[in-house]
Image (tube, coloured by chain):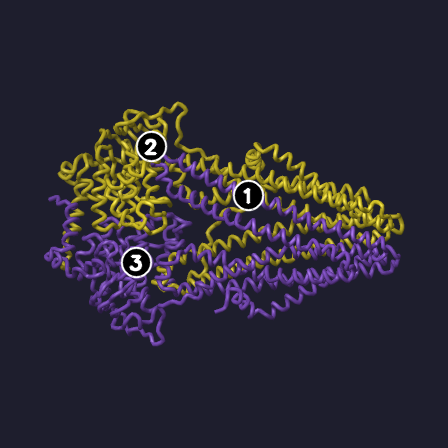
Chain colours: A purple, B yellow
């Protein structure tokens, strides 16, 4: 297993030719930067002091030519670095995205979206920054320091050594600065997140704030957070205002030091004035790398940590993979058999020894208390989790031997949380069948009793919904997501508590509609209302992961168990009028 | 196929400069006038020192050239001193100005937040929480730069430019004019290119947030994607958005990559020109080496102020958009405000009267028409009727979330518009369909109902509404951290917590907008029992779906098309032939028992 750093460097490998070109260009650049002060020195020495005026134009021409070449090379070099780093990040990002799309649901149960997002944005950006800027910075600063050191030594070893005394001081101060300011910056980031959450909650829960007349309290809390942020920001200001001007001072002090040394040398006749002017031109190149060291180390460390976090997700394997010899039935008819199925999630056994035979076209109702395993039971059908023992057959083939995508394509799964995308209603309904014509979409909407509110919306089917569009009520969302499942014309339809926010009357209509549209389709219904389950071919009642009761409505009523109790409860609130 | 994702119109990023708004923000810096004046003076000293430093250096080199060493030590010590002074001035200038700017901005943020708190529901109806959040956080942040550093920098940089020019012209007029040849190019380069660059960066950030939005959404909806087998299409879409981001990035960076080399080249052309003509002038008119070097070095200092000025210019355009959005909110007055002579509402008994009330959310559509009722203290009133008939509107008027457009709402004989809003709302509790949970402990969440309640009182309230049992089953009991998005709590549990919160508040009037969420039978029974406890001894308005709650109400009112069409007890209404309530009961019974021949 490679370390984070090794892996980042390995990313550059496919781009090594281009990378090499960029590094070579930069080398030339630095050489020209080293040569120009030499030429300037000659202008002062040869032309001005010694009066060799013929040299003026050639020297100036050379300076210009080098400058233009340098500009060109710098441009090309920068473009190459950006290109390489962007290409790598793009590949990493899309690679991880595709990988995540194959992850089982257990992964999404455990990992928060916000967490994954920050891996794919902030952390990935750290890696990009390293590839684009830090690698270049390391290379350039090294060459600058070494080059200017050599040139200055060549021009005047005495003066160079005097300046060099300052170098470790500058590096040390820069190092201390970095160490001091980083925790404060982190605190500022955290406090920003705090204030963000505070404001966000206040706005989202405004009806509660208003209902309890807690405006003052909210303001007080917000102001406190805001003042904390201010304090932390000022803390940072205090630190950097003590360090940055001081570091500038240290760098600028190098010039009088050089001049003092130079003056001494000139007075002793061991140095000429042009060389002295030339040497001052190198001071910045010599001291600046010192200031960068701390930042470079920091950025590198950050990139390594970030890359390790990023690669963690890339390395996670999916335990749900299509087998080599996976197959699909000749025809999906919707015959489902649970044969002694047991499923555990972590240490917890969620389903125990479930046996169930559902013939094509049958309707199965699953009932039970929260946490009894109802939702889990139906998610097993599309192999979103793998069972530990027993077997689950869909049309005679164990789901683990099914080709994954065809299997899922034949299951219309209306999930408990009616998740819709920020898109038009039309495209939301079309989600499982992007090429469906509008008529089919409208038909599906009609079946789900969604047509009425859609047509009443300002732009009808083209109304954009979701986060950035029109808000839908819970019932409207549920009906839209039922339409989405109906459109794909599934062999097996799963309704996981998908009409809970719809009133009883509409629910009743939807069920009748579904019955006619999806005749001969196998249907699983999870619901709490007796009215929506009592006509099912089989009703199973789960308790603690086991089937406690099963049968038709009338059979279960006779049994007088859990189901009959639920019926009695709910009947007590219904009132016979006539 | 929808391979590209819909570009949703993003907020305007730039706006023309608006002087009035600028001055309003500037007013936030007023308390720090002293800071600012001192900062300007400090910065002035620092600038003089920096320029002086270079001046002394050129003199030193000139002395050295003449082999005159008498003055050199003084000049060098002067340089060091100037360096020290500049550094100290800069340090204190940063501190003074930054604290002024940040304090001003913090105050602005607090004022904005307070203003939003004071807005009425009609304000929130038309704005999404997300967009408001952007105002409070991002828009305010984007002003920070401008007010902490931008304004003062612009003063100083302009001064620096003038100073530079004056000194250079004084030293050598002709050479300075020649050196100035590159100034238009430099100015054009900096202003024009930076402007374009800024725009391209903005485009990139838009594309980037589109990509992140898509990423976030598809990750959240991954379960839907997998069950509808949409992976390939989404992968393609994601690649396309990613490519857009890359393209926008290159378009911005290619320009940025060209920017510095171009400036560098322009600067060097200037230097070479000065050398060539300088050498000529040295021959012809006795220009000294010291002055030649001074002009060359000063020339190198030109781009910095120009750069800062162009940054300021760009900054101010971005800030103008933020300012506009901030002041759009600050200038929106809440349509529900205390009257100047509003009285504290004395402790009420809960007598609610609607006197010929008419209401519409806007002038086109009337939601309630001439509604009259009189509810005695302690009564439980159930509101029944189809969606959109006006049930919620009725209860919203009681807590004065909206003001009536005609007629009066009276509580214990006081017109709601004559009493102080807070004194009214403190005596009532409203529970909406969705129980909102704040991040914090369960204890804190319940205590939201009465901030000075002791732990014992909180627990007592939880026990009364049957929430204690499940809370104790949680790992940390009442100290369990919960939040709005976390799924630690089920819908039913959230509801019980918000019941406890309301009970703790001990309101005289209780409004219950009952949810029809999926709750299993056991929790539902607990909720039912909790509601019974809650209603005891208060005037309550219940928008209910469960017939059992409705049946026990003292008064049932059927709201249809903005009118109360039926009112009475269950027994009375059920006998009403052709009545809505009767039909409702019948339907429920039918769904329960109807046999579609399947069994």
Residue A364 visible to an observer of this rendering: yes
Q: Which residue is mark 1?
A: A235
* Label 1 crowd (10 A; few <14 / some 14-19 / many >=20): some
In this image, A265 relative to B514: left or right?
Answer: right
Which label was assigned to residue B270? Answer: none
Q: Residue at x 61, y 64 (%)?
A: A80
Badge 2 and badge 1 in a common chain: no
Residue A456 visible to an observer of this rendering: no
Specify the quadrant that holds the C terminus of chain A.
top left
What's the CA distance linking mark 3 and mark 2?
41 Å
Per the image, label 1 sits on a secondary structure element best described as helix
In this image, B441 relative to A136: left or right?
Answer: left
Per the image, label 2 sits on a secondary structure element best described as helix
Q: Which residue is mark 2?
A: B425
* Label 2 crowd (10 A; few <14 / some 14-19 / many >=20): many
Closest to the observer, A231 or B121? A231
Which label was assigned to residue A414? Answer: 3
Closest to the observer, B420 or B248? B420
Tag in front: 2 or 1:
1
Closest to the observer, B472 or B184? B472
Q: Percent position (x, y) of residue B128? A: 41, 44
- Quarter location, residue A301: bottom right
User: Do the residues under discs 3 and 2 have CB atoms within 8 angstroms?
Assistant: no
In this image, B164 relative to A542: left or right?
Answer: right
* Label 3 crowd (10 A; few <14 / some 14-19 / many >=20): many
Q: Percent position (x, y) of residue A64? A: 76, 59
- Quarter location, residue A280: bottom right
Badge 3 and badge 2 in a common chain: no
Q: Residue at x 70, y 65 (%)?
A: A28
What's the CA distance linking mark 1 and mark 3?
52 Å
């Amino acid at each position: 297993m490679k370390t984070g750093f090794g892996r980042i460097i390995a990313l550059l490998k496919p781009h090594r030719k281009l990378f090499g070109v960029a590094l070579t260009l930069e080398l030339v650049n630095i050489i020209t930067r080293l040569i120009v002060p030499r030429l300037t020195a000659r202008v002062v020495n040869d032309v001005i002091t010694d009066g060799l005026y013929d040299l003026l134009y050639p020297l100036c021409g050379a300076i210009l030519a080098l400058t233009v070449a340098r500009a060109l090379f710098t441009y090309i070099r920068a473009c190459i670095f950006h290109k390489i780093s962007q290409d790598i990040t793009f590949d990493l990002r899309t690679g991880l995205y595709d990988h995540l799309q194959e992850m089982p649901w257990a992964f999404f149960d455990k990992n928060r979206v916000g967490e994954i997002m920050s891996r794919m944005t902030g952390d990935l950006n750290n890696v990009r920054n390293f590839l684009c800027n830090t690698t270049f910075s390391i290379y350039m600063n090294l060459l600058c320091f070494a080059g200017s050191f050599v040139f200055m030594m060549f021009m005047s070893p005495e003066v160079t050594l005097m300046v060099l005394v300052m170098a470790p001081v500058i590096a040390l101060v820069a190092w201390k600065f970095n160490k001091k300011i980083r925790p404060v910056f982190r605190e500022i980031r955290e406090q920003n997140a705090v204030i963000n959450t505070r404001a966000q909650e206040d706005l989202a829960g405004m009806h509660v704030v208003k209902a309890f007349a807690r405006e003052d309290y909210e303001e007080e809390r917000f102001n406190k957070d805001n003042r904390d942020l201010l304090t932390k920001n000022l803390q940072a200001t205090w630190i950097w205002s003590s360090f940055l001007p001081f570091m500038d001072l240290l760098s600028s002090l190098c010039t009088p030091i050089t001049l003092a040394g130079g003056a001494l040398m000139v007075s002793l006749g061991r140095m000429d004035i042009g060389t002295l002017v030339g040497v001052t031109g190198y001071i910045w190149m010599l001291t600046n790398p010192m200031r960068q060291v701390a930042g470079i180390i920091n950025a590198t460390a950050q990139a390594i940590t970030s890359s390790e976090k990023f690669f963690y997700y890339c390395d996670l394997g999916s335990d749900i993979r299509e087998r080599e010899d996976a197959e699909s039935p000749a025809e999906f008819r919707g015959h489902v058999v649970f044969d002694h199925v047991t499923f555990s999630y972590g240490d917890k056994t969620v389903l125990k020894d479930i046996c169930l035979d559902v013939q094509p076209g049958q309707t199965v109702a699953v009932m039970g208390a929260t946490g009894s395993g109802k939702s889990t039971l139906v998610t097993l059908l599309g192999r979103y989790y793998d069972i530990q023992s027993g077997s689950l057959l869909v049309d005679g083939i164990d789901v683990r031997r099914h080709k994954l995508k065809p299997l899922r394509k034949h299951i219309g799964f209306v999930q408990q949380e009616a998740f819709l995308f920020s898109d038009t209603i039309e495209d939301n309904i079309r989600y499982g069948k992007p090429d469906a014509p509008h008529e089919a979409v409208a038909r599906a909407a009609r079946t789900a009793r969604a047509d009425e509110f859609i047509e009443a919306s300002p732009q009808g089917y083209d109304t954009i919904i979701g986060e950035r569009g029109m808000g839908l009520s819970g019932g409207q969302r549920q009906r839209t997501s039922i339409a989405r499942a109906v459109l794909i014309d599934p062999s097996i339809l799963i309704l996981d508590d998908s009409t809970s926010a719809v009133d009883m009357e509409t629910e009743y209509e939807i069920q009748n509609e579904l019955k006619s549209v999806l005749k001969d389709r196998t249907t699983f219904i999870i619901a709490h209302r007796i009215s929506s389950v009592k006509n099912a071919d089989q009703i199973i009642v789960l308790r603690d992961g086991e089937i406690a009761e099963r049968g038709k409505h009338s059979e279960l009523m006779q049994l007088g168990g859990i189901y009959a109790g639920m019926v009695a409860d709910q009947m007590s609130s219904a009132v016979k009028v006539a | 196929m929808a391979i590209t994702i819909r570009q949703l119109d993003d907020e305007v990023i730039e706006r023309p400069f608006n002087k009035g708004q600028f001055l309003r923000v500037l007013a936030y810096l007023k308390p720090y006038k002293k800071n600012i004046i001192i900062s300007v003076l400090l910065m002035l000293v620092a600038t003089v020192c920096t320029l002086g430093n270079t001046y002394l250096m050129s003199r030193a080199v000139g002395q050295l050239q003449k082999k005159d060493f008498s003055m050199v030590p003084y000049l060098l010590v002067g340089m060091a001193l100037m360096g020290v002074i500049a550094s100290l001035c800069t340090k204190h200038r940063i501190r003074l100005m930054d604290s002024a700017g940040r304090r001003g901005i913090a105050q602005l943020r607090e004022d904005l937040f307070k203003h939003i708190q004071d807005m009425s529901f009609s304000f929130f109806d038309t704005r999404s929480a997300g967009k408001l959040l952007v105002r409070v956080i991002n828009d305010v942040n984007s002003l920070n730069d401008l007010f902490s550093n931008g304004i003062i920098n612009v003063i100083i940089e302009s001064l620096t430019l003038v100073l530079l020019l004056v000194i250079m012209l004084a030293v050598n007029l002709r050479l300075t004019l020649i050196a100035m040849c590159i100034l238009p190019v430099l100015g054009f380069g900096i202003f024009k290119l930076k402007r374009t660059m800024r725009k391209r960066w903005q485009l990139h950030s838009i594309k980037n947030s589109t990509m992140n939005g898509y990423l976030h959404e598809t990750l959240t909806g991954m379960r839907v994607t997998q069950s509808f087998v949409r992976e390939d299409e989404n992968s393609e879409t994601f690649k396309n958005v990613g490519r857009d981001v890359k393209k926008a990035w290159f378009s911005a960076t290619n320009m940025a990559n060209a920017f510095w080399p171009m400036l560098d080249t322009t600067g060097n052309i200037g230097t070479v020109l000065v050398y060539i003509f300088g050498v000529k002038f040295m021959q012809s008119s006795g220009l000294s080496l010291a002055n030649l070097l001074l002009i060359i070095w000063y020339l190198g200092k030109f781009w910095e102020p120009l750069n800062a000025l162009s940054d300021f210019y760009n900054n101010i355009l971005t800030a103008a958009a933020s300012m506009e959005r901030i002041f759009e909110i600050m200038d929106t007055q809440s349509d529900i405000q205390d009257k100047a002579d509003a009285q504290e509402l004395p402790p009420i008994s809960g007598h609610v009267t609607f006197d010929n009330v008419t209401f519409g959310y806007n002038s086109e559509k009337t939601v309630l028409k001439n509604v009259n009722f009189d509810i005695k203290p302690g009564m439980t009133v159930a509101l029944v009727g189809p969606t959109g008939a006006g049930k919620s509107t009725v209860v919203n008027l009681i807590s004065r979330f909206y003001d009536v457009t005609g007629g009066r709402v009276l509580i214990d004989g006081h017109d709601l518009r004559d009493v102080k809003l807070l004194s009214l709302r403190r005596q009532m509790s409203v529970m909406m369909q969705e129980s909102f949970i704040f991040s914090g402990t369960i204890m804190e969440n319940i205590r939201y109902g009465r901030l000075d309640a002791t732990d014992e009182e909180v627990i007592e309230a939880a026990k009364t509404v049957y929430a204690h049992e499940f809370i104790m089953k949680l790992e940390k009991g009442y100290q369990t951290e919960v939040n709005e998005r976390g799924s630690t709590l089920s819908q039913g549990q959230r509801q019980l917590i918000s019941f406890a919160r309301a009970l703790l508040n001990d309101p005289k009037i209780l409004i219950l907008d009952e949810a029809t969420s999926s709750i299993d039978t056991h929790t539902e029974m607990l909720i039912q029992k909790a509601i019974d406890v809650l209603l005891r001894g208060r005037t309550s308005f219940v928008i209910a779906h469960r017939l059992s709650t409705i049946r026990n109400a003292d008064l049932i009112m059927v709201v249809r098309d903005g009118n109360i069409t039926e009112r009475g007890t269950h027994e009375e209404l059920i006998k009403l032939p052709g009545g809505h309530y009767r039909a409702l009961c019948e339907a429920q019974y039918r769904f329960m028992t109807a046999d579609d021949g399947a069994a």
